[in-house]
Amino acid sequence: MPALESRLWALNTPNTTYVVALDPHDGLRGIHWGRSLTAAQADSLRELPGAVRRSVSDGRDAVLDLAPASAFRYGVNGLQVRFADGTRDLELAFTEVVRTDRELTLVFTDGHYGLEVRTTYRTRADTDVIERSTSLVNRGAEPVEVIRADSATWVIPEREDYRLTQLFGEWGAETRINRTSLPYGETHLGSRRGHTSHQANPWAAIDDGTATESHGEVWSTALAWSGTWRLTAERAPTDRVAISVGFGHDPVSVALAPGETLETPVAAGLYATGGFAASAAAWHDYALRYVLPHPEELRPVIYNSWEATEFDISADNQAALAERAAAMGCELFVMDDGWFGSRVHDRAGLGDWHPNPDRFPDGLGPLIKRVHDLGMRFGLWVEPEMVNPDSELYRSRPDWVYHQPHRRRSEMRNQLVLNLARTDVAEWMHGRLDELLAGDEIDFLKWDMNRPFSEAGWPGAEDPDRLWFDHTRNLYRILDRLRADHPNLRIESCASGGGRVDFGILRRTDQVWTSDNTDAVDRLEIQEGFAQVYPAKVMGAWVTDSPNPFTRREVPLDFRFHAAMAGALAVGGDLLKWTEAESRRGAELVADYKRIRGTVQLGRRSPIRAGEIRGAQYGRGDETVVLAWRRSRRLGYRDPLVKLAGLESDARYRDERTGRIHHGAVLATHGLDLDLQPWDYASTMVELVRMP
Ligand code: DGJ
């Protein structure tokens, strides 16, 4: 056994320190996650009562950083297996440490069964986000059933109280924020649907109940995985709290054959001071630097044809829309659902990925050329993981969908889910998409997934539960391969709106479709929640028609644009019906967006809440942008001034539209008069430039 001195490890990020240490029974304790400590300070933690001197057998739950199901572990166990002889308890002995400059791996072994468990921590020089993952290596002679293999268990330092922040939702109402006192016991968030889900986003934060947007400590974690997942926040009766997060869901388990390794996805963790806004900004910064495939690239202004034409697609109506979109300044034209097979409604054609010969007798080439000639890139909608029973694909391959013997095949939106865990299905899917992309004329794919799994079986497979993991792994492989072979291809992740938004998919896509709900007012709430974790650059946001097709709400064009300008702006209305005045104003607003998008997409975001006004401030270099909205006006109430964050007190800032000069100190302490129109649905965009 290594000497006691070497049984404590401290990891440093620019502003934080994370410390783990072994107790006498090789239990790995999380003993510090917070402000930076020197090596000597970190080392002294072992002397604190209860830190590492006693083993977990004294009954304290929620203190282990690696939490194996074993004796006296009555709380949440992130690591659970069953050995071939039925033994469930793990007896892990610490065997090795592998440390490089920025990576620490601690290796534990269950000697009798030959199961090796490796827990890895990765830090970086310019982010406080710590990435963790676990791997299990079966070095024994028998298979091991893995019931739970969480990527990380994060021990939260002791505080007086604990509050949980989660992002919950539904179709059309994703990523809404809920803050709630953390109950004693176990609180589970997760998805059993096969994808990330609209209902819960794989992220959560803990604070002591006093954090605000601008003050306080916030601990948060995000899982980089797009399949099923589970996050458990445990508050033990001892008032210790831990969050354990990983892929998979109960009652699914997988067999780990002798010699096989199971690698979990990454769970990232962040400790931030400065409240929720600082936490969100640190997540954005991490995403831009270490998650997204093209960090510096700005997202183009998209035009998407879905709400304009739905399934009623023709080469002519798409070309007419493309002309209007180009005139408005859009840079990428996306033809949505309805271009392929017999897909003239949602009852047929999914799976038959060749252009509908009635609609495109000469293929897609002429339309693509027209779009390119207009100076725009061309994008296409696909939903590769799905099939309509009324399709050539299903007629020839009915066994390719998830199904179980003697059970019905339940349809949703008239479609079934392809068993992408199968190698032959994955090969077919890759081949079909690769063929579609041949010649590199298609610049962009909107990759949709419009239903969750049901009857998720795989008759005849040795270990059918693997499908829950292998579906996502094969999806990732296909995306990675397509990107490698078509380096100019950009991809949007969509699952009936925001059903697949997470750091796993964002590692291989460029933006996401935030929600099918395009009502600008509803959108503000969805966007606020989205912004707790994900940067504006990936948040697809369309300006659509008024009244909104879903809510029938009538909202002025400026408000709709200003709401969408808080993300990756796109236009999704029926431009053939817009008046000339609307088209002209639309073009002006697109031009406004192009001026500010570098700041919005890559800058630091601070939320704005002042009276009835909601908004966001973005800062990058010398530029500050404010987008603000006031939904309803209250007679007799004056709009408050909006205090700006992060400005230099001694600097002066010029308002690019009015030419007015403001002092940083005054903007910070008194605020900016947004001069909103005195009516409902007022909105504005302000550009301030720091003067030399
Ligand atoms: C769901 C998406 O979220 C919509 O934007 C659209 O692409 C439809 N699917 C098309 O079927």
Image: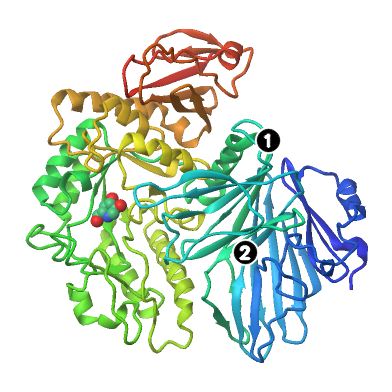
Q: Residue furthest top?
A: 660
Badge 2, how many Cα within 10 Å: few under 14, some, many 20+?
A: many
Q: Residue at x 18, y 72 (%)?
A: 391
Q: Residue 189: percent from the left, percent from the top? A: 53, 58
Residue of label 1? 216
Q: Residue at x 39, y 24 (%)?
A: 630
- Check disc 1 and report its element: helix, strand or loop: loop
Relative placement, left or right, of 592 versus 690 is left
Q: Residue 181: percent from the left, percent from the top? A: 62, 46
| 530 w.r.t. 640: above or below | below
Under mark 1, the amino acid is Gly
| 474 w.r.t. 215: above or below | below
Q: Judge depth for marks 1 and 2 and give the one in front.
A: 1
Q: Residue 112: percent from the left, percent from the top? A: 76, 87
Q: Which mark is residue 151?
A: 2
| 476 w.r.t. 160: above or below | below
Q: Where, quadrant-wise, is the C terminus in this rendering?
A: top right
Q: Is residue 380 visible?
A: no
| 340 w.r.t. 562: above or below | below
Q: Nearer the viewer, residue 623 or 680?
A: 680
Q: Where, quadrant-wise, is the N terminus in this rendering?
A: bottom right
**Which quarter of the figure has residue 666?**
top right
Q: Nearer the viewer, residue 249 or 686?
A: 249
Q: Is mark 1 within 8 Å of ligand 1?
A: no
Q: Residue at x 9, y 47 (%)?
A: 316
**Which quarter of the figure has residue 389?**
bottom left
Under mark 2, the amino acid is Ser
Relative placement, left or right, of 17 versus 197 is right
